[in-house]
Amino acid sequence: MSNDKYNGWTNYATWRVNLEIFDGMDVFEYLGKPEDTYQLSKLMQEYAENIITDYESETNLAQDYALAFLSDVNWYEIASHYQEVTA
């Protein structure tokens, strides 16, 4: 993936994960209200990874690709966005 900005976000992965997983979600209702943005970013990452790893399959290839995609996400940027929106 390119490191160029994508729709105002760090990259495509960050934009897409925010759009498809967190947009429209009451993040703090699901994840709680952590002390800081870093903790929120870790909770968001764990939540997204659990969506992928909760499915069992005969092969882990798709899961491996999905987790690799998530490694490109700027979790801190997404968490900061939700901290600002609710401030």
Image: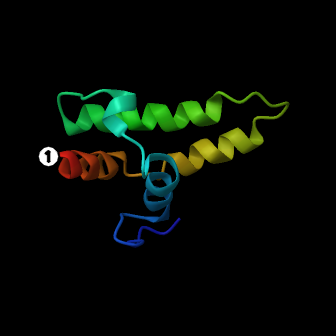
Task: Give 62 or 7, whichever is nearer the viewer.
Answer: 7
Quick check: 7 above or below 56? below
Image point 40% across, 30% down: which residue?
Answer: 30
SS of the residue at dot 1? loop
Residue at the left extreme of this rendering: 87
Label 1, residues with CA under 10 Å away: few <14, some 14-19, many ≥20: few
Residue 37, image quadrant:
top left
In the image, taking residue 35 as reference, residue 25 lies left or right, namely right
Quick check: 8 above or below 67? below
On the image, numbered disc 1 is attached to which residue? 87
Task: Give 83 or 9, whichever is nearer the viewer.
Answer: 83
Task: Give 25 or 77, whichever is nearer the viewer.
Answer: 25
In the image, taking residue 32 as reference, residue 36 lies left or right, namely left
* Total tally of numbered discs in the picture: 1
In the image, taking residue 81 as reference, residue 42 lies left or right, namely right
Image point 75% across, 35% down: which residue?
Answer: 60
Residue at the right extreme of this rendering: 58
| Residue 12 point in image, percent of width and height | 48, 64
Quick check: 41 above or below 2? above
| Residue 14 point in image, percent of width and height | 43, 56
Image point 26% across, 53% down: which residue?
Answer: 81
Image point 76% across, 41% down: which residue?
Answer: 61
Residue 83, image quadrant:
top left
Residue 67, image quadrant:
top right
Colour pattern: rainbow
Residue type highlighted by circle 1: Ala
| Residue 66 point in image, percent of width and height | 63, 46
| Residue 55 point in image, percent of width and height | 71, 30
In the image, taking residue 10 as reference, residue 13 lies left or right, namely right
